[in-house]
Image (tube, helix red, strand yellow):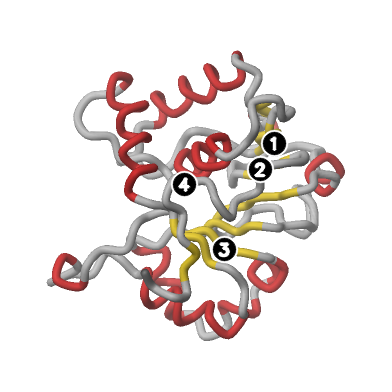
Amino acid sequence: MIPDVDSLPAGRAGLPADGSLAIVGNAPGAGACAAAIDAADSVVRFNNALGFGGGTGHRVTHLALVNRGGQPREWLADRRFLERPVVRAAQAFILPFPMLPAEHNVPEPICWTRELLARLRPLGRPVLLLPETLHQQAHALLGPRTAGHPNPSTGFLVTLALLLGRPAGAGPAQVFGFGFDGWPGHPWAAERAWFAEAEAAGRIRVHPPSLTEQ
């Protein structure tokens, strides 16, 4: 186990469980939701955190940073990455993808977990790595809803982990700024259907972005 990473053997420990929870995606047109987001006990945001410091509020307890692909490579090339307001404000970080063994990360690297850990280390804050078991659950949930082998989005993986760790009697997590659109490799329709089922079960409440503001 890497000493810089908190163990999440069930995709639960270390993530906010009790209290009110706001999960804030990056779709434009989130609307006038800053006060509701900032009032939550825990506020989870993603990547570049569109609207942070403005329309989606000023608080962040957990910042999820994708650790595979081109986005983390851009962050690592930015010498002022740690100075970004959302990074400075975050109390903890979530890396959604398990770290690939070095021999599986060649010839073209896709996993930047080691490099992100080194970059975040000076902040001295917890870094939570979502485990392979969580990914297996995500694939089992999304597989029947889509063709092929689903590649879950960071938003789906983190939301799943958060709900797995919430007590059954907890109030619904409030979900803002999820447009279920973006990189075509994610199964957006399947993820949207799962979110709808979770809302029907009372686990989340989805506040969809306004099309007129996008």
Label number found at residue 11: 4
Q: Which residue is mark 3?
A: 93
Q: CA distance from mark 1 to mark 3?
A: 29 Å
Front position among marks 1 and 2: 2
Q: CA distance from mark 3 to mark 4?
A: 14 Å
Q: Residue furthest top?
A: 200
Q: Which residue is mark 1?
A: 213
SS category of the residue bearing label 3: strand
SS category of the residue bearing label 2: loop
Q: Residue at x 63, y 42 (%)?
A: 28
Front position among marks 1 and 3: 3
SS category of the residue bearing label 1: helix
Near-viewer residue (54 or 141): 141
Say if mark 3 contacts mark 4, CB within 8 Å.
Answer: no
Say if mark 2 contacts mark 3, CB within 8 Å.
Answer: no
State which tag comes first along the sequence, 2 or 3: 2
Say if mark 1 contacts mark 4, CB within 8 Å.
Answer: no
State which tag comes first along the sequence, 1 or 3: 3
Q: CA distance from mark 2 to mark 4?
A: 12 Å
Q: Which quadrant would residue 166 be assigned to in this image?
A: top right
* In the displayed structure image, the side of residue 212 where residue 179 appears, left or right: left
Q: Where the N terminus falls, by quadrant?
A: bottom left
Crowd tier of the residue under label 2, counting other residues whose Cα lies within 10 Å: few below 14, some 14–19, many 20 or above: some
